[in-house]
Amino acid sequence: MTRRERQATGRTPSCDACATAKTSAVFQKRQLNIIKKASKLFIKKGYAQTSMRDIAKATGIDVGNLYYFIKSKEEILYLIFDMFHKPEEEIFERCEISKIEDPLEQLRTMVMELINLGGNFGLEILLLYRESRVLPRENLKSIMARESHVISQIEGILKKGIREKVFKIKDTSFTANMIMYELSLYAMRRWNMKRYTKEEFTDLLWKHIGKVVGAGEMKKARFVKRSAK
Amino acid sequence: MTRRERQATGRTPSCDACATAKTSAVFQKRQLNIIKKASKLFIKKGYAQTSMRDIAKATGIDVGNLYYFIKSKEEILYLIFDMFHKPEEEIFERCEISKIEDPLEQLRTMVMELINLGGNFGLEILLLYRESRVLPRENLKSIMARESHVISQIEGILKKGIREKVFKIKDTSFTANMIMYELSLYAMRRWNMKRYTKEEFTDLLWKHIGKVVGAGEMKKARFVKRSAK
Amino acid sequence: MTRRERQATGRTPSCDACATAKTSAVFQKRQLNIIKKASKLFIKKGYAQTSMRDIAKATGIDVGNLYYFIKSKEEILYLIFDMFHKPEEEIFERCEISKIEDPLEQLRTMVMELINLGGNFGLEILLLYRESRVLPRENLKSIMARESHVISQIEGILKKGIREKVFKIKDTSFTANMIMYELSLYAMRRWNMKRYTKEEFTDLLWKHIGKVVGAGEMKKARFVKRSAK
Amino acid sequence: MTRRERQATGRTPSCDACATAKTSAVFQKRQLNIIKKASKLFIKKGYAQTSMRDIAKATGIDVGNLYYFIKSKEEILYLIFDMFHKPEEEIFERCEISKIEDPLEQLRTMVMELINLGGNFGLEILLLYRESRVLPRENLKSIMARESHVISQIEGILKKGIREKVFKIKDTSFTANMIMYELSLYAMRRWNMKRYTKEEFTDLLWKHIGKVVGAGEMKKARFVKRSAK
DNA sequence: TATGAATGAGGATTCATTCAT
DNA sequence: CATGAATGAATCCTCATTCAT
């Protein structure tokens, strides 16, 4: 509460070095390293339970020097979100999903890309669900905006699928959100999911989503219709 | 109310100092109050961001006296989990679910009960996902065991449904976990879910689960088979 | 600069204890002790050069416990100002200065009271000149408002003296400020002033102010006038 | 500009590492720039609140490189004092004050010169009052010695004035100190003095000092004496 | 039971200074 | 001369917990 009040500084340059426009490759590499290591620690121990000393130890960067690369502990979290959620936005364009004809294939591409994003199999998303409240409202908004964008892209695919009679969905917004949420099942319930390999899980998940959008059902329906002629 | 009367209530006393005296109704009422108030604070602000002083203020119990009722901050979290997840275990028996014939109806009853458990529309589950790693391994295990028990009950229903050709599910364990996980959609994605009333959400969720277990599909299949005769 | 941003919290209750309305005599005594000891340290070493540990050592109060009595280091400074400048305001009323006929006597009473205020012979005023910039604007304003009030009371005396042809002053505001400023001579130039006893200094100062307001001059003028008749 | 050329400029090199190389004109220019910029920052924000990074930013000299020109932050403060108080010493000689006949005119010249010294209207003196205790005793002494020298020169003027029956002063040391102190009124009470232009203030100040040394009084007295004849 | 005061380790962050290039 | 990275001690402050009453 008190500590909260102190923050909320708005997102100006992230650190001393950034302020002086030092965005050299080596600097960025260092910063990236910090973000990645911190990300792992936050996932494992929790944000509040991870001290800057822990991060210093994990990165091998002196605790004081850490602040040469990042502005605050809070900013690390923000950068983690930034780093792992920015690519989300671009999936749609990067994978040229809009050029794919079949909505089911569109959705599959999207889902697979989302799953594989952080390279950490969705563990980073866990942070968003778990620790987002440490961020000041303003930063949170920008993260959420990005997320909403992805959701709306999923929704777009769903709607297209409905128009083309491939999907059968009652509330596209609800379903888009649910699909996004389901992607984190592995991360959030690791203790029960560990039994599956990544491939097994991905396979099950995609089958699951297939049901959710009513894909199988529609195919059969079409088949039935045709055979009924 | 003499010291004699305070006894035999079931819950093991939390503070070892005065094991005999702390099981009276009034003691438990106080403790329950602490747990509830703390629960709300933890949900709103996060465990680490909530101080014992916050809890003292919220309960009106002096910060020193708080320790008469609970052993530590950590224990409060444990007790919250205990409080809100113990009933989960008993749903199956309490609602006499095993006596219900139709697997779909069994599942519906289970799901509805789980959703309504804390009275807080699933917000307490959020704590489990978010803050569980604060607890020492041992405590965590006992919580997880309980959770697993519920999962296996759901799995039981699914299996029954499959046997009776009402459900069509590839991996019952996966699906049971997924269903359990989906129940928390509202809590975890409040920022997008707020647009739905509780009734709307519950309705959508149940429809969703219906698809997931392949209920609709099977009905149609049976219909098709029959009409094919 | 950064540390600055963090502060500026507005002056709400000063500490945990105050918040819960614990303003017991013993509590206040403790707080007063802190303020006094800190005041001495600030005067001797400077605000920035005095650490909370120093204050803890000086007061015998544990560094953590210190924060039970005060909200922040900054607040200590504010309270020092508050403590030593509040009485300033009340001199006029307390000493019933307005009831004194002779403006010169009015002024003398005022000056003597101001000098003796902190009991520390003006050393506290030194802090105002030296360290006031650590306070956030808002707090500074309230201190300054008080100071201005005193200045305007002095100015009132000066004006009265002018009307009664006892003083001869060109710009009352300037002179009032100057008099106020001169009161701190001892504190600000201790290294040269130490040679004087308090009495000697006070005597010299009053003689000095007498000249400044043109008191002697007017008397002689009146004498001259009369003798010229 | 070879290494040879950099030499023989008077100021002892501040950084012992490269004593021979650091006395070139360009070096001194840079150092002077640092001192001036730092002076401004110290005045505005306070010594402790100004970081070496602030100074680096203000001067455009890299924070590491700064230490090529100055030995430490503390030294900057010392050099500021040195820079602005050395000229004080020389006023007496430079303005050939001893050649002025009339003590009042002598004093006026001295006062005006002192006011205008830093070009900053006395703001640098404020630093002396405010931050001098940062310096180690030894440095402080040398600064104070210089100051005392000025005071004694003022005192000399006062004594001469007394001998010549132009001034009427009880304690010349006290008054010399007071006059010196009064010169900083503007700087120390800026918040109230801002209303005056530099000219207005200077005028008021000189009138004030006139009274303090009893100049007007003496003139009248002489006039009275004469007219009494 | 209740209270308020005490404790002290630990948190994030800053900063003067140094060093290798 | 310049640079940017490194260092680590020191700073203010918080907080769970305990203790005496």
Image (cartoon, coloured by chain):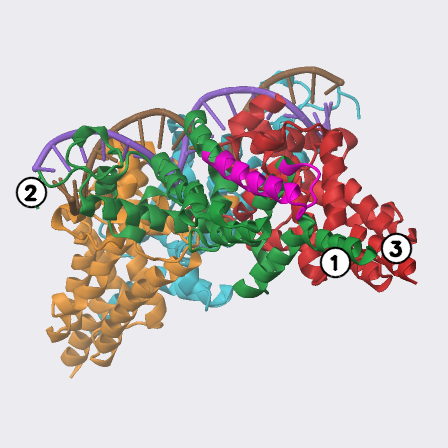
Chain colours: A orange, B cyan, C red, D green, E purple, F brown
Q: Dot 3 lies on which element?
A: helix
The quarter of the image holding the C terminus of chain C is bottom right
The magenta segment is: D146-172
Q: Which chain is disc 1 placed on?
A: C
Asked if marks 1 and 3 touch (Cβ < 8 Å), the reply is: no
Query: Is residue D162 rendered magenta in the image?
Result: yes
Disc nearer the start of the sequence (1/3): 1
Separation of marks 1 and 3 at Cα, in angstroms: 31 Å
Separation of marks 2 and 3 at Cα, in angstroms: 77 Å
Do circles 2 and 3 both sit on a common chain? no
Q: Tell me the tag on residue C152.
A: 1
Judging by the rendered image, the residue that carries numbered circle 3 is C223
User: For the residues carrying marks 2 and 1, which lies nearer the camera in this image?
Assistant: 2
Q: Dot 1 lies on which element?
A: helix
Image position of A21 with respect to B39: above or below: below
Residue pictured at 52% horizontal, 45% vertical = A2
Query: Is residue C51 rendered magenta in the image?
Result: no
Asked if marks 2 and 3 touch (Cβ < 8 Å), the reply is: no
The local crowd at label 3, few if under 14, some if 14 to 19, many if 20 or more residues have their Cα within 10 Å, is: few
Q: Nearer the viewer, residue E14 or B25?
A: E14
- Kindly give the residue lying farthest to the front in the view shown: D229
